[in-house]
Image: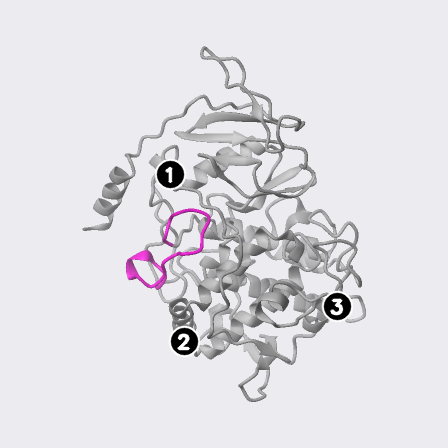
Amino acid sequence: MDVVNRRAALRLAAGGATAVVLGATEGQGFAAPAPAPAPAPAPIPGPDGPTSPGWCTTVGYRGHTVTVCPGDKMGHGLLKKAVLLDDQPLMVMAHGGEFISILNAHETYPDLMDLARDAVRQLHGASLQAPPARLPDVPAELQIPSSGRSRTAPRRRPVVRKNVAALSRAERESFVDALLALKDDGRYDFFVAVHQQAFVTPEWGAHMSPAFLPWHRAYLNLFEEQLRDAGARALPYWDWSRQQTVGAVPFTDDLLGGDGYHRPELDDEDDPQEGEVLTGPFAASTGNWPVTVSEDDRDFLRRDIGRRVRRPSGPADVRSTLGHRRYDKPPFDRTTPAFRGYLEGWAFRRAAMHGSAHAWIGGNMSTGSSPNDPAFFLNHSYVDKIWADWQARYPSVRHYAPTSSPSPGVPGLDTPLEPFHSAMKWTVTPRMVLDHRRQYVYR
């Protein structure tokens, strides 16, 4: 069956392309919908019971039931039952009066109902699924670094992480082959599960925290160990400040493949195949890349490049970020106007830097399970390079703060990072990853 006919068959099987909007309200906040010809839905007790200061509002939107329950813990932290889509909880992070969805982990919403409606649009008719309650078992094949090298490997020189545009044909082939091998033996999906779990476990400090950079440096080091074990030379990086063209590196048929399937005339309707990557080694048609760790029941890699954010940050934002001498400062969160906050992207108060690369690619890259797209690792390798460049520029300043942990979710300099310490028996702290030069260098 050709691609167009397969799409039509899938849409028919999903119930057709026509969506129905039922009683959606366009108001702000959490009040019940404005009066309409039909009676407005009655508020129901919030997730904390009848005494909760927040009450639930249920509306219909594009054929789905959306329930929003403010509750009494809206200031900061993980909200597990504040938003329900067709009675399935949507994981939401509250931070400073704004909200972030696990379906769109790189944009904020001032209102939970706005977040919920956008989540329905992003699902395109797919069914929401709750993240697993715990990490899967550690794969037996996982290579655990020790002092920057595998326990079984001989001492070696630092590996060279190159710009992906500078890879030779042989290096491109070995990189893609290694990714496919890790997917086949289960190690790749384990890394996806770790990152997804990091979104619903803010105590790890992997995001919106000073540990964002050391946590992801440790995560990349562990992943690079697996790549090398599978035959690749090193993890390349994608300079998204300059490489912003679909069809050019790294979005070519011999690397990451291109954009996802999109029909603009169906923007207001559900299309179950929206965003499916159709070209390259990770396209669903190859059978090489089933998505098994996700927030919904779609099993294919998705992208919608440039449809939420026009472009990633350019050289000016990179220069501005490198100009901040202070690594981090109180309150050590998403809003902190210091180097880490700007590099993570939140301090710009717009899609920028690391976050803008995620949002520009969209699809799986927008979610808590963003490593489903191999572009994740190339993005974070460049983020790590910017941190390394900043460290070289300011050798005398503190390269991590705080020294001691002031609160859960803000690891200190010598706090073992999770889940590496507990789940993988690999003790790694922010201090231990500050000097990367014995393990790898950038070129």
Question: What mark, if any, has residue 414 been given in the picture?
Answer: 3
Where does residue 40 sit, x and y in percent of width and height? 50, 16
Where does residue 359 sit, x and y in percent of width and height? 52, 49
Q: Earlier in the sequence, mark 3 or mark 2?
A: 2
Q: In this orientation, which residue lies closer to the viewer: 60 or 344?
A: 60
Q: In this orientation, which residue lies closer to the viewer: 242 or 265?
A: 265
Q: Relative to residue 228, is residue 273 drawn left or right? A: left
Three-letter amino acid code at the position of disc 2: Ser
Mark 2 lies on a secondary structure that is helix
Q: Residue furthest bottom?
A: 154
User: Is most of the magenta stretch helix, strand or loop?
Assistant: loop
Mark 1 lies on a secondary structure that is loop
Corner quadrant of residue 278:
bottom left
User: Is any part of residue 162 visible from this angle?
Assistant: no
Q: Please state which of the two labelled residues, at mark 1 or mark 3, is closer to the viewer.
A: 3
Mark 3 lies on a secondary structure that is loop
Q: Which residue is drawn at the image coordinates 44% and 42% (left, top)?
A: 128
- Magenta span includes 356: no
Q: Relative to residue 425, is residue 429 drawn left or right? A: right
Measured Cα–Cα span from mark 3 to mark 2? 36 Å
Question: What mark, if any, has residue 125 been given in the picture?
Answer: 1
Instruction: Specify the segment rendered in magenta.
Output: 281-300
Three-letter amino acid code at the position of disc 3: Asp
Q: In this orientation, which residue lies closer to the viewer: 62 or 399?
A: 62
Q: Which residue is drawn at the image coordinates 39% and 39% (left, top)?
A: 124
